[in-house]
């Protein structure tokens, strides 16, 4: 039985903004300035969609390692009456095909990018569900671009890590914009982006379609032609508007879970939660070693089902309910897994997860609207190539297509869409949205969210406690990534004896995601958390 008094009452706000309470509304994002942008819009009377769009644009400026207007955005929106999944997939350029890219490094440079969808998604969402003028929504991001912001320790460290990749890109375009004279910025140094500020001013004045059919599109075309890229004006002019889809849904301990349908990764999240839902919580959490082993194998099982049974997002609604969303199938599988944890498991040394980078924000307003939004430029700093004169990084989503199986739903062909690992999620309690959450972390996203939800719902942890708990992830190949110093030696030794390869990560590892969640208290008011593993904050008023 969910102990709401304990979950909501044990919450402790913090001075650094990681954990916040407010009476009217709440937003949690991956950067303090983006959170401030969202709160600013809410104070002006904007709704959750207005705040989410303003914060997402701000993140495109002040968190360039994880997202930007050169990437793609996925959203889950509860309007107060219905819940909608906005599939904001980017699109492969018309010149992109397997023979053009198969032998190349698809993760770097101008030939790695798809048609960016972020501005199309934010502009569409605002036009359909927002309330304030578009220019007002853009203003905080424009201000941050011109005035600059202090580089964080995390950003400086990531620039150092990616320095060689920046130097490998044609024209060093990304390095000229995002490094300081070819070297990483030091923490605290102010980073200004006047070219990006000018572009956002034009978009604010002329509307989001201007990016795709106006002067920016012609500049991108010229930049791509000069540097051997595939993106053209015709691709942009088609405008990758999002598709409104029905979310996938499931239940866990009596709560209703809504999350992202294909091409997103809501299915493995629901599948994992259904498997755990078949185990009584008092049994699941009785033995720490057995629970960890079960978690490892549930993650592997969900990854296997997800990657082994991909669906074309346009075909998916037409098929009968498939087994990843079946509670009966989940119960059958968890019984098989549980029966096997006392014996040595054969571990396949065949597949470890792809790496990638993303950002997430969650918003609830005082009128009942909720947004869970995840956006990305794929890898850290995307393709490392920047749009000349426009100041944003191109994504490198062309690496997220299939290049071998022509019948694969994400096989590369013109105007096709890439795989996505995002899972923006909203949890309902008694037909009312109670919790909105999401995380970056590529294929680790669903496992991060599963563990967070189990901590809150099964163990009655407040969100600030749940987000601090140590995390693990397992690849299909049997590599278990974990915060080694926080897990316990007995667990490590057990997993090693069982044949898993241990990937030791530091405490509060950047690698293991970053939950940004907001909660509506049943007795009034809101709570928000921004994961201690990244730079973000939560806030409201």
Image: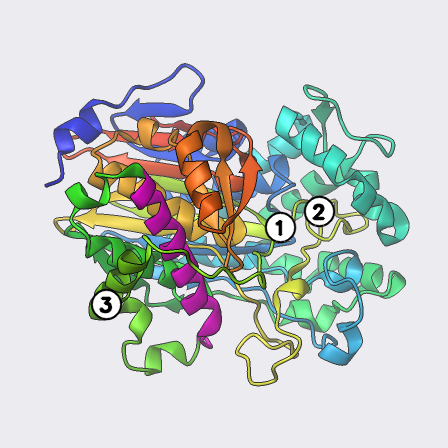
Residue in the foreground of this view, choosing between 496 and 391: 496
Q: Residue furthest bottom?
A: 407
Which labelled disc corresponds to residue 332? 3
Residue in the foreground of this view, choosing between 423 and 38: 423
Query: x, y (%) of residue 190?
Result: 71, 23
Q: Whole-Å distance between the Cαs marked 1 and 3? A: 44 Å
Q: Name the image quarter holding residue 184.
A: top right
Image: magenta residue range: 289-313
Query: x, y (%) of residue 307?
Result: 48, 68
Query: x, y (%) of residue 256?
Result: 20, 54
Say if residue 82 shows up in the picture.
no
Residue 303 sits inside the magenta stretch: yes
Q: Element under label 2?
A: loop
User: Dot 2: few (<14), some (14–19), or many (≥20) neighbours within 10 Å?
Assistant: many
- Chain-order first, disc 1 or disc 2: 1
**Residue under circle 1?**
69
Q: Nearer the viewer, mark 1 or mark 3?
A: 3
**Residue under circle 2?**
392
User: Dot 3: few (<14), some (14–19), or many (≥20) neighbours within 10 Å?
Assistant: few
Q: Nearer the viewer, mark 2 or mark 3?
A: 3
Is disc 1 in contact with disc 2, using a CB cutoff of under 8 Å? yes
Is disc 2 in contact with disc 3, using a CB cutoff of under 8 Å? no
Looking at the rendered image, the quarter that the N terminus falls into is top left
- Chain-order first, disc 2 or disc 3: 3
């Amino acid at each position: 039985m969910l102990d709401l008094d304990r979950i909501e009452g044990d919450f402790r706000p913090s001075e650094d903004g990681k954990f916040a309470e407010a009476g009217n509304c709440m937003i949690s994002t991956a950067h303090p300035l983006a959170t401030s942008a969202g709160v600013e819009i809410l104070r002006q009377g904007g709704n959750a969609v207005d705040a989410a769009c303003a914060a997402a644009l701000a993140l495109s400026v002040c968190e360039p390692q994880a997202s930007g207007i050169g990437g793609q955005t996925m959203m889950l929106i509860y309007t107060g009456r219905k819940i909608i999944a906005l599939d904001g997939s980017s699109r492969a350029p018309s010149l992109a095909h397997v023979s053009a890219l198969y032998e190349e490094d698809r993760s770097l440079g101008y030939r790695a990018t798809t048609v960016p969808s972020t501005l199309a998604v934010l502009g569409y969402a605002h036009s359909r569900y927002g309330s304030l003028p578009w220019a007002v929504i853009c203003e905080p991001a424009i201000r941050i671009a011109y005035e600059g912001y202090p580089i964080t320790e995390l950003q400086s460290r990531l620039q150092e890590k990616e320095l060689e990749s920046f130097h490998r890109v044609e024209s060093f375009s990304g390095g000229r914009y995002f490094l300081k004279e070819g070297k990483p910025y030091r923490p605290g140094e102010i980073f200004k982006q006047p070219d990006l500020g000018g572009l956002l001013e034009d978009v604010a004045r002329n509307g989001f379609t201007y990016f795709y059919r106006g002067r920016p599109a012609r500049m991108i075309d010229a930049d791509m032609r000069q540097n051997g890229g595939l993106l053209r004006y015709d691709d942009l002019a088609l405008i990758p508007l999002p598709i409104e889809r029905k979310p996938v849904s499931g239940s866990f301990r009596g709560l209703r879970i809504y999350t992202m349908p294909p091409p997103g990764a809501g299915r493995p999240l629901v599948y994992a939660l259904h498997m755990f839902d078949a185990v009584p919580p008092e049994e699941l959490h009785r033995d720490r070693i057995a629970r960890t082993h079960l978690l490892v194998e549930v993650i592997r099982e969900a990854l296997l089902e997800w990657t082994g049974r991909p669906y074309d997002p346009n075909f998916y609604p037409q098929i009968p309910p498939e087994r990843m969303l079946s509670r009966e199938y989940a119960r059958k599988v968890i019984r098989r897994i549980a029966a096997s944890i006392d014996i040595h498991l054969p571990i396949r040394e065949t597949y470890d997860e792809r790496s990638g980078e993303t950002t997430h924000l969650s918003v609830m307003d005082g009128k009942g609207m909720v947004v869970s939004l995840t956006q990305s430029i794929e890898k850290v700093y995307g393709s490392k190539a920047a749009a000349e004169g426009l100041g944003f990084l191109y994504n490198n989503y062309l690496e997220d297509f299939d290049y071998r199986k022509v019948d694969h739903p994400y096989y590369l062909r013109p105007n096709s869409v890439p795989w996505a690992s995002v899972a923006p999620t909203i949890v309902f309690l008694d037909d009312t949205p109670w919790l909105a959450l999401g995380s970056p972390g590529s294929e680790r996203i669903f496992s991060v969210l599963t563990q967070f939800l189990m901590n809150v719902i099964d163990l009655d942890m407040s969100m600030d406690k749940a987000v601090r708990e140590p995390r693990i992830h397992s690849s299909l190949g049997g590599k278990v990534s974990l915060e080694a110093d926080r897990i316990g030696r007995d667990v490590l030794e057990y997993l090693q004896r069982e044949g898993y390869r241990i990937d030791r990560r530091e405490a509060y590892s950047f690698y293991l995601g970053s939950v940004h969640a907001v909660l509506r208290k049943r007795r009034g008011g809101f709570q928000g958390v921004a994961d201690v593993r990244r730079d973000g904050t939560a806030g409201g008023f």
